[in-house]
């Protein structure tokens, strides 16, 4: 793990909550409208999770995740940005087979309709990132800025934030089991349609 980084990854707050609770170890991503013609790319393999309320709606997540969303919404919009979750990408899968994504149902909080819509946006396919998530005992607070706005995945923080003292959300054995299970679920995808790092 890097000792510090100033890269952050924008993700729905409800997905961040699910990652932070160990509910999922998977990030699905198509890419925002500002990603450029080539679409989403895994530019960084370690990053802070930057929670956002942009786009997340009740009907876009599974009902089991509604309590997480309710809790987030009950707190209201925070005055700044709280960063307490850090992700390390262990595997990158570019999934071009819709059936393979169906096998990941239950491994993430997106609804099937959201998966379908994102998969088919522009050109078929989605990235599935298997991430190991770590938590700070106390959040790092940063001031919100117009620099963070926009439909984009990656943001540069004003300064690097240290990763000292982070604790894994899941123990080694549990995370390794989740990772193997995801690999097995995707194993039906033809090799030329799946990339791993």
Image (cartoon, rainbow, N blue to C red):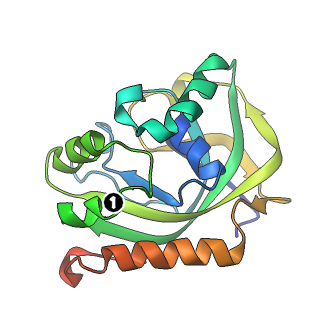
The picture places residue 196, in percent across and down from the top left corner, at: 38, 77
The picture places residue 60, in percent across and down from the top left corner, at: 35, 34
Q: Quadrant of the C terminus?
A: bottom left
Residue occupying image coordinates x 57% and y 32%: 67
- Can residue 36 be seen by looking at this rendering? no
Residue furthest to the bottom: 191
Residue furthest to the front: 64
Q: Nearer the viewer, residue 102 or 55?
A: 102
Q: Nearer the viewer, residue 172 or 133?
A: 172
Q: Is residue 115 left or right of residue 25?
A: left
Residue 46 location, quadrant: bottom right
The picture places residue 4, in percent across and down from the top left corner, at: 74, 58
Q: Is residue 18 left or right of residue 162?
A: left
Residue occupying image coordinates x 43% and y 44%: 153
Q: Residues within 10 Å of mark 1 (few under 14, many from 20)?
A: many
Q: How many marks?
A: 1
Residue 61 location, quadrant: top left
Q: Which element is circle 1 on?
A: strand
Residue 106 location, quadrant: bottom left
- Can residue 94 be seen by looking at this rendering? yes
Measured along the vertical axis of the image, is residue 60 above or below residue 171? above
Q: Quadrant of the N terminus?
A: bottom right
Residue occupying image coordinates x 30% and y 65%: 103
Residue occupying image coordinates x 32% and y 74%: 186
Measured along the vertical axis of the image, is residue 115 above or below residue 58? below
The picture places residue 94, in percent across and down from the top left corner, at: 29, 66
Q: Which residue is mark 1?
A: 127
């Amino acid at each position: 793990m890097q000792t510090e980084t100033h890269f952050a990854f924008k993700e729905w707050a409800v997905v961040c909550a699910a990652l932070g609770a160990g509910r999922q170890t998977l990030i699905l991503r198509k890419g925002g409208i500002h990603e450029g013609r080539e679409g989403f790319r895994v530019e960084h393999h370690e990053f802070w999770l930057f929670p956002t309320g942009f786009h997340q709606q009740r009907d876009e997540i599974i009902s089991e995740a509604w309590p997480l969303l309710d809790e987030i919404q009950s707190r209201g919009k925070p005055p700044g940005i709280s960063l307490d979750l850090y992700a390390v990408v262990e595997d990158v899968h570019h999934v071009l087979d819709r059936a393979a994504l169906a096998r990941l149902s239950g491994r993430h909080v997106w609804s099937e309709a959201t998966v379908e819509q994102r998969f088919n946006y522009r050109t078929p396919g989605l990235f599935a990132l298997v991430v190991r998530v770590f938590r700070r005992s106390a959040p790092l607070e940063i001031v919100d800025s117009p620099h963070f706005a926009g439909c984009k995945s990656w943001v540069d923080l004003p300064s690097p934030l240290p990763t000292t003292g982070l604790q894994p959300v899941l123990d080694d054995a549990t995370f390794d089991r989740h990772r193997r299970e995801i690999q097995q679920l995707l194993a039906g995808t033809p090799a030329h349609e799946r990339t791993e790092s």
